[in-house]
Each structure stands twice: as structure tokens, then as C-alpha cells.
Image (cartoon, helix red, strand yellow):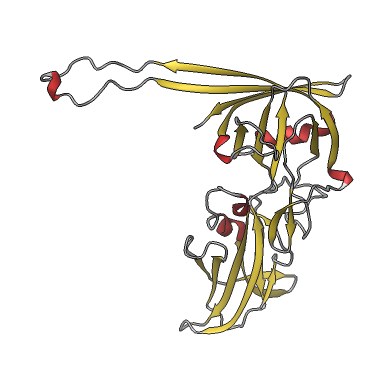
Amino acid sequence: MDIHGLGDNYYLTQNNIWVNIFGMPDNTKVVEIKATNMDKIGVVEPIVVKLRPFEKSFGTQAIKMVSFNVCQIVRALFVEYAKINDAMEEIRFEIKCRDTVGGVIEEQTVDRYFLRGGVWADKDKEWHLNNYDYLIVGKWIEWEGVLFNNHPLQINNGELQETNGWIPEKYLFHKRVLKGCDYKIIMWLNSLGGLQYFVFPRYEIETKTKGSKSIGKINGGLEEADFINSRNEVERTITVFDKTPAEIQDVIVDLIQSNVVYMGEGVIDNSGFIDPKDWKLLKIVSNKAVKNNYTQVYDNEIKFRIGY
């Protein structure tokens, strides 16, 4: 049994990666694929898929095979993102060829890591990463005057680890200078499954309150009414602005495409950290980017709703 499509590792789950299996025994009736999230045993139930082989012609030869979208299976094995370790999972595939009475006539087990990310198809982009790769999209930006202790994630033998501060030169965009000390730090899950940050020096916060309808009539006396009028609806939004050099505009593009975005509202402590409870969930409302071809700078304006 030859498995084609799982020869690499650290695959990106948001892409559609097809696996083909050839060379199974002639009396194979069904190919059974059991996929297990080895990092979430007891939390996520394994998925079992059964496929009937079909014949495909290659020149004058007909070959029996099965084909399946491996990422469609894997995505169902991921839990909702809550912490760094949720961004990469080890998936075990137990592949069995069964005969007409259900007996196993050949089997293989393959373990691979999958990342919560995806990239657009391009001639120089693979749908997988490699050991010791950094989970950085575009450039990692250094912010002068912001004492924020943040480091990119790196793949290290099946684990995601924060780097020790040293980052290869090809990833770095050297210090951006901020005017003033009032800014907002935005953190998001990037398209490679890593955490990335952007500091916005200008922002506007807007609060809207919408009154609910009052209850027109109370049947019976007030002593029987154990309810109150519906509460007012409050919506908070933040709009951030930045004049972004074209060299790092792809970082902004990655931000607005992310489904997991947070804003740091707390104080950065002496160690350079923001308390986890002070990261507020954001949902993008709209964005606008205007490029000045003379200065090669983008005027970015992004509006988020604070909380869902």
C-alpha cells in the first residue's frame, strides 16, 4: 500500500490537501481511515472514514486507488482556539485495507502534525512547513519604546515554542518609532498558526447604546411581576489607524483575514507582559487601505467590534 500526499509534515489545515492511496491488495473491498488527535485524546473523538476503491487509468494500465481530502478530516479534530498549544496538533492515521468479510489484509499507521493555518496557492509556497520554521507572516516588527515582551513561535520537534529573542534577519523589520505613549496593541492568530502583533499609535473608541422597547402592559399587580424591562444594548467599537510602509502591508492583510483577534487593554507590567484577562476579543467590522504610490505607504483604517 503506497500513500501519496503525507510525505512531509507540519501541514496547514485550511488548505485542501488530497491524499491518494495506491497498491492495495487486489481483494480490498474497503479502505478504512481512522484519524485521532493524539493531543486531545478523551476530548475529541476519533473520526473513521470508509472508502471503496475505484479504478483509474494511467496510460494503458488501470490502477485501484482511493482519494480523500485529509484537511477536511483534520479540521473536524481541532478544538476552538484557546491557547498556543491549540494551534498545532499531532494526528494519527490508521489506514486498513479490509476484504469482503471485514478482515484486515494490510494496514499502515502514519503520524503527522497539522497547523491551524493556510496559505494562498503560489508557485513558491508549499502547503506545509518544516521543523524549526518561524510562524511569522511577512515581517516581525520591532517597536521602539514599547516594552512588550513578545516573541514569535517556532516549530521545534513537534512543539510550538517561543523563541529566546533572536530572530533571523530575513524576518525582521527594524524598529518603528512611535510618537507618544498612548497606543493599542493588537494580537491575532496569523495564517501560519502563530501569534503576531501590531501596535497602532492612533485609535478611536466609540460606544453606542440602543434602548430596548419598554413593556407596554403588566397583567396583574406589580407584586406579581418578577421581571424588569429588557436591558439597553451597548456596542463598543474601536477604529485603528496606521501609515504602513508597503514592505509590511502584508502583515496588515494577514490581520484583517484572521478570525482570532485580541486587543490588549491592560497595563504592561515590569516583565513586559499584559495580564491574560486584559486581552479583549475583537471582531472586524470593516477596513480600508489607500496606497500612496509616491511614498509607498498605505493609509490603513480598520474598525473592530469589541466583544462578540
Front residue of this view, candidates 48 and 222: 222
Residue 275: image quadrant is: top right
Q: Position of residue 197 (x, y in %)?
A: 71, 37
Seen at 74% across and 74% down, the residue is 60
Q: Is residue 115 above or below residue 111?
A: above
Q: Position of residue 146 (x, y in %)?
A: 75, 31
Seen at 56% across and 32% down, the residue is 283
Q: Quadrant of the N terminus?
A: bottom right
Seen at 73% across and 54% down, the residue is 127
Q: Position of residue 104 (x, y in %)?
A: 53, 83
In this rendering, the count of numbered labels is 0
Residue 176: image quadrant is: top right
Q: Position of residue 259 (x, y in %)?
A: 59, 39
Seen at 63% across and 21% down, the residue is 239
Q: Is residue 208 above or below residue 245?
A: above
Q: Is residue 183 above or below residue 98?
A: above
The residue lying furthest to the left in this view is 220
Front residue of this view, candidates 79 and 222: 222
Q: Is residue 123 left or right of residue 4?
A: right
Front residue of this view, candidates 283 and 207: 207
